[in-house]
Amino acid sequence: MARWSLTVNGKQQEFEAESDMPLLWVLRDLLGLTGTKFGCGVGACGACNVHLDGELVPSCTVPVSAVGGRKIVTIEGLSDKTDHPVQKAWLEEKVSQCGYCQPGQIMAAVTLLENNPHPSDAEIDAAMARTLCRCGAYPRIRKAIHRAAKSESL
Amino acid sequence: MSIVYNPDRRNFLTTTAAAGAGLVLAFSMTSCVRSVPPGGRESSGFRPSGWLRITSDNHITVFVAEAEMGQGVHTSLAMLIAEELEVDFSMIEVEQAPVDNAVYGWQYTGGSTSVRDGWERFRQAGAVAREMLIAAAARAWQVPVAECRAEQGGVVHAASERRASYGELATAAAGMPVPQSIKLKERGDFRLIGKSLPRVDAVDALNGSIVYGADVKLPNLLTATIVHCPVFGGKARKIGSEKALAVPGVHKVVEIDAGVAVVADHFWAAKKGADVLDIQWDFGPHADISSESIQQLFTEQADGYTGVEQEISTALANAAQRIEAEYHLPYQAHATLEPMCCTVHIHDGVCEVWVPSQNPSSAQVVAARFSMSRVEYLAQRVKGKLLGRSLESVRVHNMPLGGGFGRRLESDYVVEAVQIAKAVDAPVKLIWSREQDIQHDFYRPASLHRLTAGLDEQGMPVAWHQLAVGVADYGPPYYKIPTSGGSTIEVDTGVPTGPWRSVSLSWNAFVIEGFIDELASLAGKDPVAYRLDLLKIPRLKAVVEMAAEKAGWGGSLPAGHYQGIAAQPGFGSYVAQVVELSVDKNKGIRIHRIVCVIDCGQVVNPDMVVSQMEGGIIFGLTATVTSAITIRNGRVEQSNFYDFPILRMGETPPIDVYIMPSEEPPGGVGEPGVPPIAPAVVNALYATTKVRIRKLPVRAEDLFS
Ligand code: FES
Ligand code: FES
């Protein structure tokens, strides 16, 4: 068991964990940040997507020892008032069904738009391909990404 | 009145809220099905139930007993109350009702029934409350009731320009007699019903604050995960748990009826422990079954079948032409994105359960049965009656569901969590791995169908028979066919099966709509025209006509594009879908557009209907083109999303949904979007390639052979 210190949503967090514990379970079970979801545990669904220094990663595939000094942002830390342009677009397009995949979808969309403010449909497909939605909210996710791309505040 | 059914959602993991002053409205389940509510609470002896509470500080809360699993039911049912109550929807708070059969009846969310069942009940609940609030105001102001009206969360008396909020009136309203008759609003007066209001949980869904079953947090909570015998029906013979117990954070290895659980500080330790369990299994009687052996069993059963009714076999024999076809469907997993999970804490004589369930009443019953201590169990056995713990001592908190689709009608994981909790002295949260979730589902059954039709000289059907093997239901055709019928042969394959979004329509629509399309092409007729000639149900006919029109059926399409249609009545609704696709030997199938028309009667929230159609179509497409569960050596071959792939965004075609205007009572919407998509796709594939696909999922080798 080792001691770790990570920056999560701008806050320094100290805790003890085995070095192979995936970031997903650190967030959920040690730090109580359950907005990041468990869907597959093998990097195949994107429910656990978080940002590491702005880069999109499925947190179930990142052992705590590999995080290093990178800053972690989870869905809880994306905005204070659920008012990130992507969240606002999601609200406008009434995207969510059961909602379980949506934190991962939103984290993926934010990264996409940061790298490519005006993505084409094909670029959206490519960027979102690893984030699954069993409820089938895809048509609205696509619309919401286009809407967010058009919003000025991004 | 002080009956409060509400544990405050924000605090409900730690407290049971105390009753507040105010109006808790109350109906018995029997009153819900009458158009006029029966006598008052006091007079009739009906036990009150609580769909609505208005507190003196003007908090208006609607309690919904149905499970929220993405269909938006917390919003649509609350809209019905708000409509009659005359409040702005923004004033309404919605909470999950606790599980209490005495108040809400058996709580079960399935069969696309919530809005259908709630249509009268929830509007009555709102209307009765409104009338009692008006009566309370009229009495306080000493004016005739007829001069008062409800408006935006209060009662007004125009002549004296007085207004009181519902909160101010709540305590007095609680003492008013329950009105003997209630007039519900006319359609033309609806303010909310028919509007696409945003869901009450819309914002929470975007910031991680919804607490799903997997997210339950309690003091001293332990986490468990389970390993089931990979072969259906097998059991652990010998468990080597040393390595698991050596994993840091692991507390205990617990053998329960369904398998072996590892209890730990957190999921990761439990999973690591589970991965190094050394279990010798007794595989039981199903170790040799495979998809092929099951298929063979089905074929033998079908071959041996001789039970076609005389009338049908005569009609088939006398027909000018007779055609036969055999259809196949595989097992399908639900694969809710949130794996199965359940938290249980047995303490102070109470069994407390936090579970995302479509069937929380069943969760309560199984928890009562399995949470008994050994002493209680023996005492009951001595008396010769195994009743289980009393239901009152089992508190079930139904948590938001990360997907349901029928999987969460089962309570297997509740039994498991209760049995694990009995072995530890702390609350414990059971979370299945994805692998266990895919391999230990209650699958949509695999089935084989033999279809036989007799045609007249014009190619119109005069006789029809469906032999359905492996399932309990065949689909009576909704086409005008003078002599038709079907039979079923249920087969115990050893593979557990259960309802899967749209239940029997998930196979019967494929079979009926595929075969009718075959008949149309044999007759040399257009598939839409042929259906319209034969359809018996006017509302189904109308959606077929509208879908054809919206899809530009028969018009000019881009080169290489072809269309297929399918329609299906079910769950009180009528749906037709047109698929436009093209096929390229190298690139495969490309679906360019799907048009869907639904007549679901009076619509409560149109956007949620559209959303359910989109979701249903995508769910159905996964089973049509990408995934199946197959069996080898008694076990499921797939284990996670890489080998049970669900549709991705880039594979999702544009979907245009149209709602047929209707004043009929509401129909269901959660399931009816699923059934037509598979046959619409294979019918379009036939139009494109002249290859008839009768087996799902569609495989390149079937298409290009
Ligand atoms: S849980 Fe991490 S990708 Fe699925
Ligand atoms: S909204 Fe349910 S999985 Fe995406």
Image: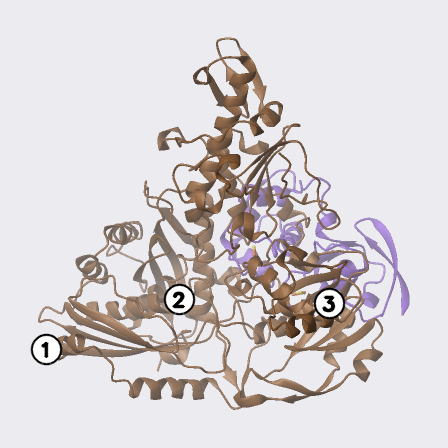
Distance of mark 2 from mark 1, alpha carbons?
Answer: 32 Å
Percent x, y of residue B380: 65, 70
Return the residue at label 2: B506
Return the residue at label 3: B421
Front residue of this view, candidates B502 and B123:
B123
Distance of mark 2 from mark 3, alpha carbons?
Answer: 37 Å
Tag 3: residue type? Answer: Ala
Percent x, y of residue B501: 46, 62
Return the residue at label 1: B318
| Chain displayed in purple | A
The quarter of the displayed image where residue B174 is located: top right
B481 above or below B665?
below
CB within 8 Å, label 1 to label 3:
no
> Dot 2 lies on which element?
helix
The quarter of the displayed image where residue A71 is located: bottom right
Q: Are marks 1 and 3 on the same chain?
A: yes
Percent x, y of residue B226: 68, 74
Badge 1 density bin: few <14, some 14–19, many ≥20, Cα 10 Å? some
Tell me: B442 left or right of A52: left
Q: Are marks 2 and 1 on the same chain?
A: yes
Name the tint of chain B in the rendering. Answer: brown
B446 above or below B659?
below
Percent x, y of residue B690: 27, 73
Chain to which the residue tagged by mark 1 belongs: B
